[in-house]
Image: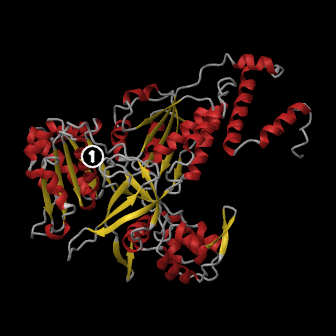
Amino acid sequence: MTMTDPPGQAFTLEQWRLIEQLSQSLGSVQARWLSGYFAGFDAGLRQALPQTASFPEAVAAAATAPAARKLTILYGTETGNSAQIAKDLAKAAEAAGLTPKVADMADYKQRELGQEQDLLVVVSTHGDGDPPQPATAFFEFVEGRKAPKLPDVRFAVLALGDTSYEFFCQGGKRLDKRLEELGAQRLIDCVECDVDYEENAESWVDAIVAKLGAEMSAPAVAASVAPVEALSAATAGAHDKRNPFPATVIENIPIVGRGSSKETRHIEFSLAGSGLTYEPGDALGIAASNDPATVAALLDALGLSPDATFDLKGQMVAIGEALTHRFEITAVVPRFLDYWAMLSEASALKQLLDEEHAGERAVFLRTHHIIDVVRRFPVKDVMPQGFVSALRPLQPRLYSIASSLAAMPEEAHLTVSPVRYELHGEARSGVVSGMLADRVAPDATLPVYVQSNPHFRLPGDDAPIIMIGAGTGVAPYRAFMQEREARGSTGRSWLFFGERNFRTDFLYQTEWQSWLKDSTLTRMDVAFSRDRTEKVYVQHRLKEQGRDLFAWLEEGAHVYVCGDASNLAPDVHTALIDIVAEQARIGREAAEDYVRSLQADHRYQRDVY
């Protein structure tokens, strides 16, 4: 049957002509919406009417259908990806005639959980299976004894994660399991997404909207596609992750002294003409490119010419270009391990795929790059198409912005310490941090975008703040001070900063001293771990100043922690609990509740990585 042949007697010729005209003008989003619309219309006819009902009777009956169920979209995020998916889902739901409410787990009123009807959850996983920090309180409530039974709730979970971590998508898996334990019914199975989540997330959104839309009556679904088109027009040309802005590098200089054991750089970008804005606490996303030397070495190990082509989404692309700009080629992830084990037939790799060797597999993934696997288990006649199918798309990297637009209009500053290490006898570097340090000079352009971080925000101008950070974790606090200075804020501020050596590693030292002199910065305590035999870190300085620190907390101070997630963040967290317990003369459990209340009130915020 062709499109010009109406199927049997289902339509009149005039109806079919109208269908043809409409179908030729539709985009993919509109087509999906119509699919859900007519599925819902058909479901309404089948359930509410006898088979002999006429079209006008069907419309009249559908108009009296029950009201739509309450729909809540709940997200938990650390870097903003879950938030963006939740917003996209809300737009798709609205286009299908639904009325969703979108809520951040950090702000969600937990008592409302028992009154939900349809609950859609988008949540990422942080670190080794932990929920995003802003969502911690929600997880504690849902997984605790106070969580309500949910027999009248239907739910679906989209879990974001990274397969290079052992506890992949654990945050989403935990919520999916717990909601079922509380009696809620799944709308669809939990979907797990790797860092290249876009396609799976889009399919999940489509499936959810189609299912919910199919349950709607025709009039309820009769929202037009116009709002979606208007939204697309309104955001056309906006710079974001999908459409980064080519920013010019103004400055790229080392800011550590001669003889430092670290390498830290201050990098300035021009945002002139971009329309990009940000607030202190936000991050700058930088589109990555792999080191050409690494690409060349990998191609050599594979025996492939950089000019060899393959099909990428309908276009023929040279593999040299693709490996440079489009795919992750360093970290080994399970999908590549599966592929190379199949291709090489290496028994050692096949053994790692068994679940009983999960621990060994995790160690192997951490201690090998793709090139190490290719060299150790060589394969002849590798096909470019198959090879790239086992790789993940190259992801942008996020860096805390170290400047304020109020002080530095149309600029964004970064504080970057390139990752350097040796692996299998070769020097290795971080993909983007190495690129910024080694291959980016002033006047170069890099694709950038702003990633909002609403969970790391300055309070009102008169509220005291306590800033805790080590190394490049000091970056957002420079932005905080610039912002407060520009505003003429009166609130007190206290910096705890840690690094290795005072003489070489006191980042932005003259600026801090200047802010101390003019009282923009009220107090500063520093810890330089390698200046003395006994190592001293910021958590030690916190405890030394425990009495005053607790007094600031009692006076309404907001606490910020920025830096290493594996050591700094937990050590500082423990120190805060210890200080509260000691100074308030309460038990540890009560002290933990005190710190949790700071988090719930958004007075304890972390930006850790």
- Residue 514 versus residue 120: which sits nearer the camera? 514
Label 1 Cα crowd, 10 Å radius (few <14 / some 14-19 / many 20+): many
Left or right of residue 42, residue 413 in this image: left
Residue 235 on image: x %, y %: 55, 43
Q: Quadrant of the C terminus?
A: bottom left
- Residue 318 versus residue 544: which sits nearer the camera? 318
Note whether 596 is above or below 297 in the view shown: above
Q: Which residue is mark 1?
A: 483
Asked if residue 156 shows in the view, the reply is yes
Point 51% across, 65% down: residue: 334
- Residue 306 versus residue 196: which sits nearer the camera? 306
- Residue 383 versus residue 360: which sits nearer the camera? 383
Which amino acid type corresponds to the residue marked 1 in the rendered image? Glu
Residue 119 on image: x %, y %: 50, 34
Asked if residue 341 shows in the view, the reply is no
Point 42% across, 73% down: residue: 439
Note whether 504 is above or below 563 in the view shown: below
